[in-house]
Image (tube, rainbow, N blue to C red):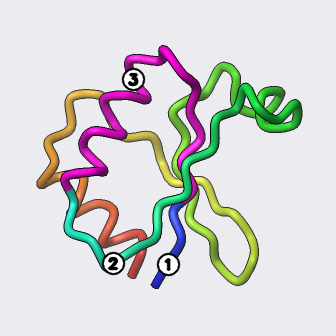
Amino acid sequence: MKTLIFYSKPGCHLCEGLAEKLAQLPQGKFQLVMCDITTNEQWFALYQYEIPVLCVLVDGVEKALPRFPPRISVAKLQQKLWEYLG
């Protein structure tokens, strides 16, 4: 099972929208780790202007996925994630 890391912050409507869509995806294909960038100075410095950010953990190294449009459907998000997760 792959690990998806989701960098976000409270009050971000784009983050909330993506989180809602991720919650609708079938379980078992990936483990989702939620990271609030306001709790870590390094994350905040890296992602304060980029959130939401999804990364996949591959051999202990995070690889950022391309940004998904805010209006992406759940079905299209699933299709794209399955492509990236292999």
Residue 2 at what x, y percent from top left? 49, 78
Badge 1 vs badge 3, beta-carbon distance below 8 Å = no
Determine whether the residue tagged by mark 1 lies in a helix, strand or loop.
Answer: strand
What's the CA distance linking mark 1 and mark 2?
7 Å
- Residue at 56 percent across and 65 percent down: it is 56
Closer to the N terminus: mark 3 or mark 2?
A: 3
**Sequence-wise first label, 1 or 3:** 1
User: Alpha carbon of mark 1 to alpha carbon of mark 3: how far?
Assistant: 23 Å
Q: Which mark is residue 29?
A: 2
Please name the residue shown 19% across and 52% down the image: 24
Counting from the top left corner in percent of width and height, residue 85 is at 42, 75
Q: Secondary structure at mark 3?
A: helix
Q: Decide: few, some or many residues near mark 3? Use Cα within 10 Å; few <14, some 14-19, many ≥20.
A: some
Foreground of the two, 8 or 58 = 8
- Say which amino acid is labelled 2: Lys
Q: Vertical placement of 1 versus 41: above or below?
A: below
Kind of residue sitting beneath label 1: Lys
The front one of 17 and 62 is 17
Tell me the quarter of the picture where residue 42 sits: top right
Residue wearing tag 3 = 14
Query: Which region of the structure is painted magenta?
Result: 5-24
Q: Is residue 78 left or right of residue 47?
A: left
Are discs 1 and 2 less than 8 Å apart at CB?
yes
Relative side of 76 to 49, left or right: left
Residue 18 lies in the magenta-colored region: yes
Q: Answer above or below: position of 77 versus 32.
A: above
30 to the left or right of 27: right
Mark 1 highlights which residue?
2
Q: Position of residue 50 (x, y in %)?
A: 61, 27
Above or below, 18 against 13 in this view is: below
**Does label 1 or label 2 sit earlier along the sequence?**
1
